[in-house]
Image (cartoon, helix red, strand yellow):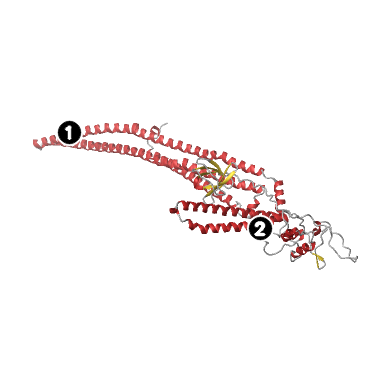
Amino acid sequence: MSWGIELWDQFDNLEKHTQWGIDILEKYIKFVKERTEIELSYAKQLRNLAKKYQPKKNSKEEEEYRYTACKAFLSTLNEMNDYAGQHEVISENMTSHITVELARYVQELKQERKSYFHDGRKAQQHIEICWKQLESSKRRFERDCKEADRAQQYFEKMDADINVTKADVEKARQQAQVRHQMAEDSRADYSSILQKFNHEQHEYYHTHIPNIFQKIQEMEERRILRIGESMKTYAEVDRQVIPIIGKCLDEIVKAAESIDQKNDSQLVIEAYKSGFEPPGDIEFEDYTQPIKRTVSDNSLSNSRGEGKPELKFGGKSKGKLWPFIKKNKGAAPEDFSNLPPEQRRKKLQQKVDELNKEIQKEMDQRDAITKMKDVYLKNPQMGDPASLDHKLTEVSQNIEKLRLEAQKFEAWLAEVEGRLPARGDQARRQSGMYEAQNPTTVNNCAQDRESPDGSYTEEQSQESEVKVLATDFDDEFDDEEPLPAIGTCKALYTFEGQNEGTISVVEGETLYVIEEDKGDGWTRIRRNEEEGYVPTSYVEVYLDKNAKGAKTYI
């Protein structure tokens, strides 16, 4: 099966067919290119979708992600990012392995096709020239033969005529001989050209054209094979990411299976528990008896402090049951005394933690400025040490201010947790006067702290129940859970950590990173149980992309 033999006379059709083959290849390239664009667009939309539903930092949404269902949803969003990344990989691989390669191959194919058909047209032109030479030689031979016949007939006519002179007859005879010679020469020339044409035509149809058409056939078969290989690559690119996509889906299933409804229910209790006991039964008040009406001993206001005088004002009780207390309008007090005990404790603890973080940040900044000042002192050409004094003083003042603020909230926190008496009893604690010795004062204090609508705030409930003896303050803070490692680092130089909060490292030492550089030039690291800060420029950091809080820098 050879195009050179079977299609020897289909030059134009083969030219059209091979052009069609190139068009098909270009159409497939366009198809793959559009597929890559769709994959990129899909990946971008997936990433935007995951980003849209990510919790906003420092917002109420971030608090909601304590629940296991929300954590599972967050894991789903993170896996969708990885899922989107695989579609980007599909687009990238299809572009590099199919689109780019086929585009280069098409250019080579066009050049090869052009070369073959150029040779074919050249062979056609040569055989056409030979044909024209043959036709010309043939017509000349035909014309010379006719001229020779006419010259012979004229000679015979002159020779038969008795009135013609002998000289005229001789002249006609010579003219006939010349014409016969010319016819013979044309005949020989025509015969030679005919033989040459037949040879060229045989070479054209049995050698040149078959060879050219065979090359075109091989070129076309390579094109067909190449497009088939590209289709296989197209499928393989998709197949390669299936395991990773499956892993992403497995992680989503794993996150869904980690949802614990009991744990979430417990978190709801911790989030909204007030700390109060349910109110008891209200006793019947007999108005037929000529006695002063009092609030039942089982009411909420008396349920926690038996033996204490009831809080009265104008003959009516001001104590109300907590579930029915109206919320005070206006701005919330600084000490969160408008909240139930348990919620107040959480808010105060959160505030103390925030202040401690701010204090640590300011201390880090102070240490950094101090180190910079030491550098300036050792190398005056780098800067003026006195220029940092104002900033150092300002930071120290901020630290002192934050510490006072933290102490205030810690005192309130200790008060709520029952580790200190109420603030109104501080002076009496120092003089040895307790609530048991002066209940009237306590009651008056409680009345002064009633809200305008007669409801009690949580703080007044606390004060009415203070039974704390004059004991020293007992620090019973739980140990903080150590921060998780978010990567590792390698010390590039030796650093002597002599200031508070820093840690010494030796060149080449490998340590754990627990907090990234926040822009102040310091990185927090850990060696076994020892933690501290080192200059960021002294270490080479390798962050774990999967670690919580880790960021990727490009």
**Res 201 visible:** yes
**Residue marked by disc 2:** 408
**Res 554 visible:** no
| Image-based side of 219 in relation to 488, left or right | left
Q: Amino acid at mark 2?
A: Lys
Residue at 46% in and 38% down:
227
Please, what secondary structure does the residue beneath circle 1 have? helix
Find residue 219 and report its horizontal and vertical position in percent. Answer: 41, 36
Find residue 321 and report its horizontal and vertical position in percent. Answer: 78, 59
Q: Is residue 503 above or below residue 383?
A: above
Which dot marks residue 353?
A: none
Find residue 431 and report its horizontal and vertical position in percent. Answer: 74, 60
- Picture quadrant of residue 309: bottom right
**Residue marked by disc 1:** 181
Q: CA distance from mark 2 to mark 1?
A: 138 Å
* 508 or 164: nearer the viewer: 508
